[in-house]
């Protein structure tokens, strides 16, 4: 399996994108993979909230993911949109959390597409 991953955007942009493309050695079962992703509690579209300690102020991070397959190529895209409800300064900790979430989602995704008995790249 060959892969290419691009992550772009930042908190300053108020959006962060991830595109991961996997070139598999064999054609994938697109229907099966689509059903796993569509019904997965891990890859579901979700809102996350960060609260400021002692206040009701919060920031919302919306994550959306989409899967595309054609032949032996699999593409997954993940978008994080940061919606500030109030004037809260976002920190590098917020960005690190998104980067960590991307890394963990891709680890789970690669587990789904890596055939048993194959060595991970």
Image: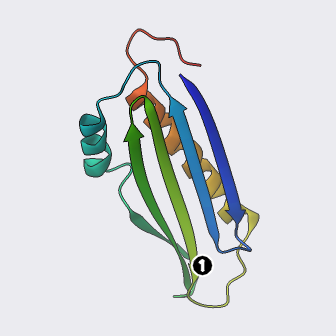
- Residue at image location 63% in from the left, 36% down from the top: 4
Residue reaching furthest to the bottom: 86
- Residue at image location 41% in from the left, 28% down from the top: 113
Looking at the image, which is closer to me, 114 or 62? 114
Q: Horizontally, is 50 left or right of 67 in the view?
A: right
Disc 1 designates what residue?
53
SS assignment at label 1: loop
Looking at the image, which is closer to me, 27 or 53? 27
- Percent from the top left, x then y, of residue 111? 43, 28
- Percent from the top left, x then y, of residue 46? 40, 64
- Residue at image location 29% in from the left, 43% down from the top: 34
Question: Mark 1 packing: few (<14 Cα in 10 Å), some, or many (20+)?
Answer: few
Q: Quadrant of residue 5?
A: top right
Please determine whether, in this image, residue 36 is positioned above or below residue 41.
above
Please determine whether, in this image, residue 78 is positioned above or below residue 110.
below
Tell me how the rendering is colored: rainbow
Q: Horizontally, is 77 left or right of 95 in the view?
A: left
- Residue at image location 55% in from the left, 71% down from the top: 81
Please determine whether, in this image, residue 112 is positioned above or below residue 17.
above
């Amino acid at each position: 399996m060959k892969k290419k991953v691009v992550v772009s955007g930042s908190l300053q942009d108020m959006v962060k994108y991830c595109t991961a493309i996997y070139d598999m050695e064999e054609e994938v079962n697109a229907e099966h993979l689509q059903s796993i992703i569509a019904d997965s509690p891990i890859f579901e579209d979700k809102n996350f909230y960060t609260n400021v300690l002692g206040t009701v102020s919060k920031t919302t991070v919306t994550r959306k993911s989409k899967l595309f397959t054609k032949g032996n190529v699999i593409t997954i895209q993940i978008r994080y949109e940061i919606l500030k409800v109030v004037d809260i300064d976002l920190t590098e900790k917020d960005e690190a959390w998104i980067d960590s979430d991307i890394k963990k989602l891709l680890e789970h995704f690669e587990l789904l597409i890596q055939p048993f008995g194959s060595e991970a790249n």
